[in-house]
Image (spheres, coloured by chain):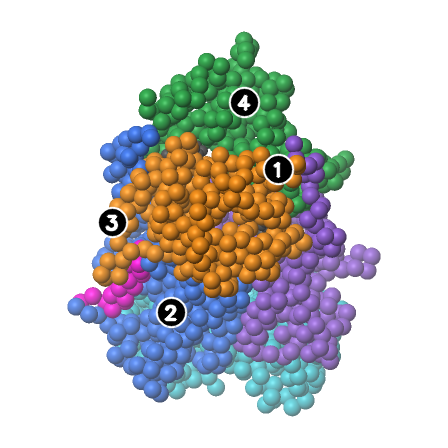
Chain colours: A purple, B blue, C cyan, D green, E orange
Amino acid sequence: MPQSSNGVAPAAVTPFARLSRRINFQQYVVYLGFLAIFLFFALVLKDSGFLTVRNLTNIMLQTAPATIMAIGLVFVLSAGEIDLSFGSTVAVAALAAAVAMETYGIAAGIVIGLGCGLLIGLINGLLVAYVRLPSFLVTLATMGLFAGVARSLTDLRSIPVTNSTFTGFFGSGSILGIPSLVWWTVLAVAIGHIIYRETRFGAHVLATGDNSRAASVSGISVARIRVAVMMISGGVAALAGLLYAGRLQAAKYTLGESDLMTVIAAVIVGGTLLNGGKGSVIGALVGSLMMGMLNNGLILMGLSVSDQMIVRGLIILAAVAVSLREKAR
Amino acid sequence: MPQSSNGVAPAAVTPFARLSRRINFQQYVVYLGFLAIFLFFALVLKDSGFLTVRNLTNIMLQTAPATIMAIGLVFVLSAGEIDLSFGSTVAVAALAAAVAMETYGIAAGIVIGLGCGLLIGLINGLLVAYVRLPSFLVTLATMGLFAGVARSLTDLRSIPVTNSTFTGFFGSGSILGIPSLVWWTVLAVAIGHIIYRETRFGAHVLATGDNSRAASVSGISVARIRVAVMMISGGVAALAGLLYAGRLQAAKYTLGESDLMTVIAAVIVGGTLLNGGKGSVIGALVGSLMMGMLNNGLILMGLSVSDQMIVRGLIILAAVAVSLREKAR
Amino acid sequence: QTVGPAGEAATPSAVVALTDADLAALKDKGYKAALLWHTSSDFVNAVTAGAKDEFARAGVEVVVTTDAGFDAARQRSDIETALAAKPNVILALPLDPVTSAEAFRQAVTDGTKLVFLSNVPSGYKHGTDYAAIVTDDLFQMGKQAADALAKSIGGKGKVGWIFHDATYYVTNQRDNAFKTTIEKDYPDIKIVAQQGITDPARAEELASAMLLQNPDLDGIYVTWAEPADGVLAALRAAGNTKTKIVTLDLAEPVGLDMVKGGAVVALVADKAYELGRAMAAAGLKSLLGQDAPAFVVAPALTVTKANVADGWKESLNRDAPQSILDALK
Amino acid sequence: MTMTPSEPVLSLKGIRKTFDAITAIENFSLDVHPGEIVALVGDNGAGKSTLIKIISGVYAPTAGSVAIEGQTVSMANATMARAHGIEVVYQDLALADQQPVYMNMFLGREPVNRFGLLDRRRMIAETEKLVTDLDVRIPSAHSTIRDLSGGQRQGVAIARATHWASKLILLDEPTAALGVAETAKVETIVQSLKTRDIGVLIISHSLDQVFKLADRICVLRRGKQIGVRKTSETDKNEIVSMITGLH
Amino acid sequence: MTMTPSEPVLSLKGIRKTFDAITAIENFSLDVHPGEIVALVGDNGAGKSTLIKIISGVYAPTAGSVAIEGQTVSMANATMARAHGIEVVYQDLALADQQPVYMNMFLGREPVNRFGLLDRRRMIAETEKLVTDLDVRIPSAHSTIRDLSGGQRQGVAIARATHWASKLILLDEPTAALGVAETAKVETIVQSLKTRDIGVLIISHSLDQVFKLADRICVLRRGKQIGVRKTSETDKNEIVSMITGLH
Ligand SMILES: Nc1ncnc2c1ncn2[C@@H]1O[C@H](COP(=O)(O)OP(=O)(O)OP(=O)(O)O)[C@@H](O)[C@H]1O
Ligand SMILES: Nc1ncnc2c1ncn2[C@@H]1O[C@H](COP(=O)(O)OP(=O)(O)OP(=O)(O)O)[C@@H](O)[C@H]1O
Ligand SMILES: O[C@@H]1[C@@H](O)[C@@H](O)CO[C@H]1O
Ligand SMILES: [Mg+2]
Ligand SMILES: [Mg+2]
């Protein structure tokens, strides 16, 4: 028998390698883009209020709903699926909550709002997992469908949200001096990160997106995983809807409509693969903050909308180029 | 030596199998959705003008630009990439052509219009192929960037296109009694189909999207293929822009903006995989006609706009369910 | 004084009314109408309601309703599709004079009676090409908004101007009228900050930035009610109780804020329902071969806490939302 | 080499499988008893892997029945094989390429600590032990499968299956990518499964290996079951002629 | 077994390759002459496949040089290997899974008719011939690779490489998935490449095969080049002890 008692061969591995494996530098390269943009604005806008606490807080507050949607999308993409319908879910949930709250009070509003999100996620999930339709088309269809529902639910009107407990809890209040939206973000990211990285469920989501056959022969019910990730996406989108409603003290069918691309971009910039098997909740947070910071900085620069669009495009390209260049081997 | 002179074993293959292999039924299942929707509207709307020659021609005319964009996207998706920027390209090309035509005449207009499209495609392609950035993020960035360019190019003004040779050729004219938009569609689909199915280039696009390492070790320059598909997408989007300009006899920065999702849906409904390696130009045509027919039929049904959205979502789900169910093995 | 495209004097909308004889003559003719809108919104719904009620009186059925989503190409398709249903009257808002000129040509050729809202395709002649233009008094709306804001801040101070940064005749007219009025009539008021907006969802971001750089703003003009929700959220987030807001259109959340003595001091509205009614009446008159006045105007309304109940009724032909009525008590 | 008289752990009856027009397997029947090693041999495309996938529930048979310990199972899906104590080394290995070795080793049965969180430390420690036992050198339990050599990947799949099997193990060419020493070690391990009373169905193109390990040899040719022989009662020549169809 | 005195077709000097922290190959040098068959053997993870990929240009070496027919090439990318007359059967086969067999067979060199359109008829006919020559039974030239058995796929890759090679062929465990008869046939074909004056570098874990085919045997262990032996001057015991490091 050969001298092979060492299945794991430390011989070929240098000490630096051990360290670098533990820290895994590659994983942090995604954050370079964020840093680059931050430094850029900090320099360019140093007299325009960019670096003030208030402005930085604003960025946090304004990105809260998108960050929370992004967490759901990390699960969906990691499982090898996609969800285009979460924007519509935001609107349905916010409207349903606003309407329910008027009559039945805050608890009913929250339950019904979140329930709508979970239900939409369930419908998407069942169609994807059991009828075996491509999630792109399923959620494209339900995106339109539920946008239609959101519209007819309230005849295109805005609904005020006046319950101050609700608006405090979900939007404009603070707890221990920290705005509630920050709490929500921190909470959602922490829970999302733990579920994603530290639970069996998270591992199964990744395996499903990486190689669904391998997952399924390993005893993982990929169908149930698929339903679950679509429900997570629906659930967090509904939560985002409640946050919008709380923040704006109003709900309207247009809520969430324009978040689709920003949120997908945030998630992908944050290092989650479009094709599944790899992702990061923390990355999605950073990606979302990056998008928010970009919007904020460009406005503060005083650019016209057209120029903002042009410069935003250029900066995203530059940021992606520093961080997401495919590793050449 | 075994009795193995027959490398290709007809023994295990029944005559029916040979036939079915040649016809490849699976490939046509995609069209069932189209047929189902057509029959549905033909029945429901028989007195509402749906089946008139003029209405069916309208569907052809209305979908012409989307169909042509869809052809480009078939190449892009087949090569394993994505293009989100083609809508902006439509606007830039139409505006550039309109502006150039005013001063330098029709030829300059056409050349500059198409040139813009190819240039945008080239930029996307170089970033994707040589800087190795994910095409999703590259084209998301250039989508915004060039939408900004389109806006500032003409300060949000609409530019009239008065050259009647141009408008006849690209929009409202007919040749041999057949509307020029129909000619363009037929031409683009025919050429696209032949390039896709019958040329080495088409085969290399599919191989690149299927397994880029296999393609590259087979002597295929996957970088060049990637640049080429992005340029095709840019080029056909520019052509679509000219068609819009010809049809509306005007160009505006909003052109193409709302085509993104419809075109992607058309392509995927038509049997092209989002992940590369498999697709169909004819399928994209059918998918595009299906989307156009759906819009047309729902309007003629007299539904409110919200109800149109809801019913459209339901019908897409149904159509996809008959045609795109993943083959259980 | 507001005049028509060819310098026609404005006819008050109330003048355009159908007599009993007219109604009798229209009944049982099987006339059909189509409503081809540029978008969907509560405003559009109110116009639709006014039109439908008037059409119903004459026994005319609305067979088609469309929403072009501000897409010129889509509007052209909508027109073609609608014509397949052979409507006798079309009510529409042309997206912009240039792109809609060709779009509506087929309808003119088919002999359909066209009544336009707010603006007119370029080169169209009253009588031969179209039956009438009906419009809200766009200049007055902007002006009254300026007057209301000026009044609330005592005729002097600094204001911010959030305008619609897109080509859309209606908002462009109103936004510019506000600006012109402030500049001409209120020498002591300075517009110190201005920001274009395209996506109402980004209003909070934008207003936050504006307030960050101009914490001492006395007032803000917001182009319409939906983004005003975001501006209110920005004020709340900044703890700002000083800055006043005016906006256009009636919506429950801003209305409630106004009634509760919040930042909103006035909502300027048009008589949306009346616009629809007058459009239908003008179209029907034209069907009867009567001359419809070329240029019909419905007045603008400044709605404040004092007249909110009446304002709602006058503008939208429905009672003000219960929450507002309750808050008034 | 005595045949266990006990109830068979696996019993296949009249299995048939077609893919559209292609008949991959026709009328296949076989029993595997606890502690018995049965080899499945045959030319390329004979239907061996297809059979394995039918047993493990990846494919549903077109006809015929699969029984585990006497109970007919209709394993509509692949997730159930494990529940029946069946482990498989698939020809394509069925590993999640972008995940680390230790995650693949515990896929579907990850240990958790008392807070319900993944016990990575334990997974890593056990992975290092399992891989060491197998003699396949792997850079680290943290390595991503994608970065491993062909033999290293196969080693991971084998370590996983042999560790978890309780009743039946299906091995589809398990040593095809392994080196000389590694192959020898795997053969030892397979033999040791016998003592754990586990039934083994092994596919191999190496007749040396088959004759070394198997109690019985089953030959498939172009989807047809040619015959089953006790290893003690046959020789390579007979098996080769059964595989190739030449006499 | 005479060593060709001609210029080597392949000449590797001081090749070294690291992946981040892992050293896959250190200081490897080897010449392969036209018409010579050199076997590369070694334990799993020794660096054999990595070496093949360096020669074919998939990886750039961290240090060292690769020369084809005396000319140092810096094959920055994999597309150039073919231009140098090098064909490869990769361990993972490098097939486009969703494309039909005939397309894979001609990938990158599809024949066209005089209109510049793909000559499918010809591709299909030639594919059927090539596959037949190889003795690997494949349902049809139209079959999608994904639907083939493991051995059938390997057969496609071998048929492709052996058909097109003009100077040098690199075979990474080419018969690992093949049956008895199919392996024999491939061995015959490899031997026939000699007569076409093609250099062959073959990786194999089967020492029987190595001793049957190779003129020289090169041993790698954990990235280190242990030595090169003429087959006529060594025996299995020596090679095994070189591979395992035990004496
Ligand atoms: N999913 C599928 N679709 C169509 N045909 C298939 C499919 N899977 C297998 N086949 C065909 O069924 C036959 C049997 O394949 P199988 O993989 O079982 O062979 P095998 O005996 O394992 O061969 P090998 O020794 O080469 O691995 C082959 O002809 C193969 O092409
Ligand atoms: N892309 C990569 N990234 C990191 N490590 C790699 C990569 N490719 C190979 N390695 C490592 O380099 C070493 C050599 O791998 P290689 O594939 O060359 O081995 P091999 O000799 O072909 O083994 P086998 O006989 O198992 O195929 C292994 O330890 C492997 O884990
Ligand atoms: O009042 C409407 C709005 O609802 C908005 O869409 C912009 O302009 C107006 O016509
Ligand atoms: Mg097999
Ligand atoms: Mg190898």
Vertical placement of residue E190 versus C42, above or below: above
The amino acid at mark 3 is Arg
Q: CA distance from mark 2 to mark 4?
A: 63 Å
Residue picked out by circle 2 = B235
Q: Chain of mark 4?
A: D
Residue found at the very far right of the displayed protein: A176
Badge 1 element: helix
Q: Is residue B191 magenta?
A: yes
Q: Provide the residue span drawn in magenta.
A: B177-199
Q: CA distance from mark 1 to mark 4?
A: 24 Å
Residue picked out by circle 4 = D213
The amino acid at mark 4 is Leu
Q: Chain of mark 2?
A: B
Between disc 1 and disc 2, the foreground one is: 1
Q: Chain of mark 3?
A: E
Residue picked out by circle 1 = E241
Q: CA distance from mark 1 to mark 2?
A: 63 Å
Vertical placement of residue B21 versus C76, above or below: above
Are callouts 4 and 3 both on one chain? no
Vertical placement of residue C257 versus C101, above or below: above
